[in-house]
Image: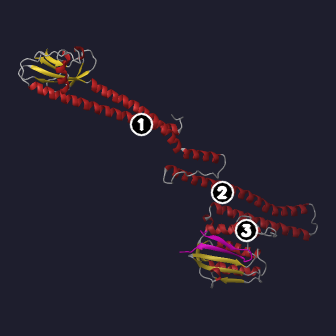
Amino acid sequence: MSRLSLRARLLLLTAGLLLAGLGLVGAVVADQLERYQLGRVDAQLRSFTEIVSRVSVTVPPGDLDPARDAELVDPALDLVGTPYLVYLDADGAVAGGLHSSRFDDAALPPPDELRTVPPGGDAVDLRAADGSGRWRAVARPATGWAATVVAAAPLAEADATIARLRTTSLVGGGVLLVLLTAVGWFALGRGLRPLRRIEHTATAIADGDLTRRVPVPAAPTTEVGRLATSLNTMLGQLEQAFADRAAAEARMRTFLSDVSHELRTPLFGIKGSTELYRMGAMPASADVDEAMRRIDREATRLTSLTEDLLLLARLDEAAEAQLDRAPMDLRTLAIDARHDLCALDPTRPVELTGPGGDGPPGPAPVHADEDRLRQVVANLVGNAATYTPPGTGVRIGVGTVDGRAVLDVADEGPGLTAEQATRVFDRFYRADRSRNRTGSANAGLGLAIARSLARAHDGDVELDTALGRGARFRLTLPLAE
């Protein structure tokens, strides 16, 4: 059974239930018809025996010969529906009686069967003497002498009717079962067509086509419609998961390549200086001092890069564990950032305002790790100082916007394209790769670290930029209660 298709199993189950239903209905109808036929015959026999038993006679009727007086006896007995009337004496012997000429003595119930009929008027079944059929008999005591009146009627017609009904039910039920089975086969095939489409879609997806979707041939409120909708949702999630996995693998490959490149550059500088010294290419003390300065610079760069990578790894694994929160105000960081930027480039005008350049700086209380937020602001200010021409104006805004603490670092530099803006927070990404990188700030990790630290504080760093109108980096954090 388990090897059959769903269509065949459903059809067999439906056909079995239909067969059981037809058989039950046929049996109930035949039983009720048989009860009705027996009830009608019993009523006729009881009425006739009741009338005959009340007629006071001293001897039973015996002067009529059924063969000779058939024209008189047969219509009378057929009229009352009792082809056989017999009197039994006190000893149970047949004292006399009448029967229709249509029945010979062998077709009538024998005396032994007649004596078993109870005289109380209850109907019983009797067998004919030759076993050709059943008879229904009722008996009552006779009036005026010690005898019993027994009236009997054959059940051949009733049995034939029941047999014809059962035959008709069997044939009709068989034909109906075949027709309904054929109709059910095609109906099930049409009904299961959406499942076959789902099967074909699943096969295509298993072959690698993740863009396929299951057609929704029915209303979403039906079982097939809900199944198709759920499968399409699942397939969309699977496709997105595979796409995210492929993108993550691509980012990992790029990350490893960039890490290798960034680590290789200072290592090559250190290695080259030591090789020159070992080969005796630095005879003068000044050459050795310059080589040591290069080694120290590259080692410092390498150390800074390694610490940045370790910080990013810790933030990815457990960001909250890297924070030491305490109440503070972002205005302190904004003021210090203004002084730092002025110290880096005294020719650069730096303005301290509220968020968006409106009004004076406002309060921005937060519950955060001050050292980590200083690192975020330092990266944003360093980015503005590095990627804008000397003397370019910078605005630092601080305050509250929409119930959140905000710190802006906006410059009037060349800005970024839309494609650059979408990737500027990626690790090791630099919008201008032609720039000489002399420190870890230019390794492409600054903005990635800034955003990771901001998100560790349940905040974020957002960028608003366009070519020719500068860039604004906005740090947003939840306000302290």
Q: In terms of sequence position, does the residue under pointer 3 or pointer 1 come before the other?
A: 1
Q: Amino acid at mark 3?
A: Gln
To which residue does mark 3 refer? Answer: 420
**Point 67% across, 80% down: residue:** 396
Rendered position, 276 above or below 91: below
To which residue does mark 2 refer? Answer: 244
Q: What span is in magenta?
A: 457-481
Q: Position of residue 362 (x, y in %)?
A: 60, 82
In 3D space, how far apart are the residues under numbered discs 2 and 1 (Cα atoms)? 53 Å
Rendered position, 173 above or below 235: above
**Point 62% across, 73% down: residue:** 476
Q: Give the farthest residue toward the front.
A: 71
Q: Amino acid at mark 1?
A: Leu
Q: In terms of sequence position, does the residue under pointer 2 or pointer 1 come before the other?
A: 1
Q: Position of residue 254 (x, y in %)?
A: 74, 59
Q: Is residue 464 magenta?
A: yes
Q: In terms of sequence position, does the residue under pointer 3 or pointer 2 come before the other?
A: 2
Here the colouring is secondary structure
Corner quadrant of residue 459: bottom right
Q: Is residue 252 magenta?
A: no
Q: Secondary structure at mark 3?
A: helix
Residue 272 seen from this side: yes
Rate crowding at label 3 as few (under 14), some (14 to 19) or many (20 or more) other CA atoms within 10 Å: some
Rate crowding at label 2 as few (under 14), some (14 to 19) or many (20 or more) other CA atoms within 10 Å: few
Residue 115 seen from this side: no
Number of the label disc, if any, that sits on residue 18: 1
Q: Nearer the viewer, residue 181 or 357?
A: 181
Q: How many dots with numbers?
A: 3
